[in-house]
Amino acid sequence: MRTLKSDDGPDDDHRRDAGVSDATVKALGKLSEALEVVEHARGYLYGFHRLTGKADLALGEAVELLRESGAEALAEQLEQELVGRNVINGRWTFQIVEDYDDGYYSAFKAAESMARHELAEGKRHLFEAEMKEDRRTHGLPHHEALPTEQDTQ
């Protein structure tokens, strides 16, 4: 039989302090949601980066195969016009990723962190922790507030 560490709610890192209002928890939850969307977009940007690089490498192989097949003029044209070409004026995808990470992404992460520290002592996911408490069936297996001792060993 599993023994629960606790079934009386979230741990202290996910429990709001006195004076933190419902409106603040809701606002921080929405800010966290927005950051999650930015994280998701960042994943797509990295996917774009990887796929574009993979396409350029495959294009290089196609050019070599065209040369071997005797289509030298076409191979030369593709090599000059497309192989290694910037995807955006002056930039390869790694430069786009770096600009995104160093600019918008970093600013967004810093702003979300600043808001949490200013309003909730830096605690993360208060909204979600309270939603879990509201939605789970207290006292039933697989609805525990925290991992069991067995799960953390």
Image (spheres, rainbow, N blue to C red):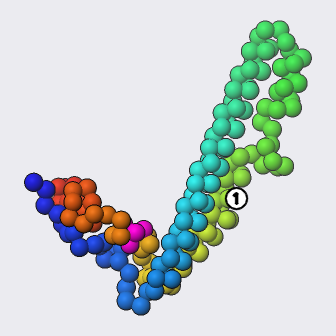
Expressed as whole percent of the image width and height from the top left, the position of residue 34 reads 59, 66
| Residue at x 24%, y 66% (from the top left corner) | 138
| Residue 131 drawn in magenta | yes
| Residue at x 28%, y 63% (from the top left corner) | 137
| Image-based side of 61 in relation to 143, left or right | right
Q: Which residue is under mark 1? A: 99
Magenta residue span: 128-132
| Residue 12 drawn in magenta | no
Residue 52, relative to residue 73: is it above or below?
A: below
Query: As shown in the figure, which amino acid type bears the numbered disc 1?
Result: Asp
The residue closer to the viewer here, 132 or 37, is 132
Picture quarter with the C terminus = bottom left
Residue projecting furthest to the top = 70
Q: Would residue 129 be seen by someone viewing this image from the given angle?
A: no
Residue projecting furthest to the bottom = 19
Expressed as whole percent of the image width and height from the top left, the position of residue 42 reads 61, 54
Which picture quadrant has residue 124? bottom left
| Image-based side of 84 in relation to 25, left or right | right
| Image-based side of 142 in relation to 86, left or right | left
Q: Residues within 10 Å of mark 1 (few under 14, many from 20)?
A: few
Picture quarter with the N terminus = bottom left
Expressed as whole percent of the image width and height from the top left, the position of residue 18 reads 37, 89
| Residue at x 67%, y 53% (from the top left corner) | 97
Expressed as whole percent of the image width and height from the top left, the position of residue 12 reads 31, 77
The residue closer to the viewer here, 43 or 89, is 43
Residue 17, relative to residue 51: is it above or below?
A: below
Circle 1 SS class: helix
Q: Main secondary structure of the magenta part?
A: helix
| Residue at x 85%, y 12% (from the top left corner) | 71
Residue projecting furthest to the left = 1
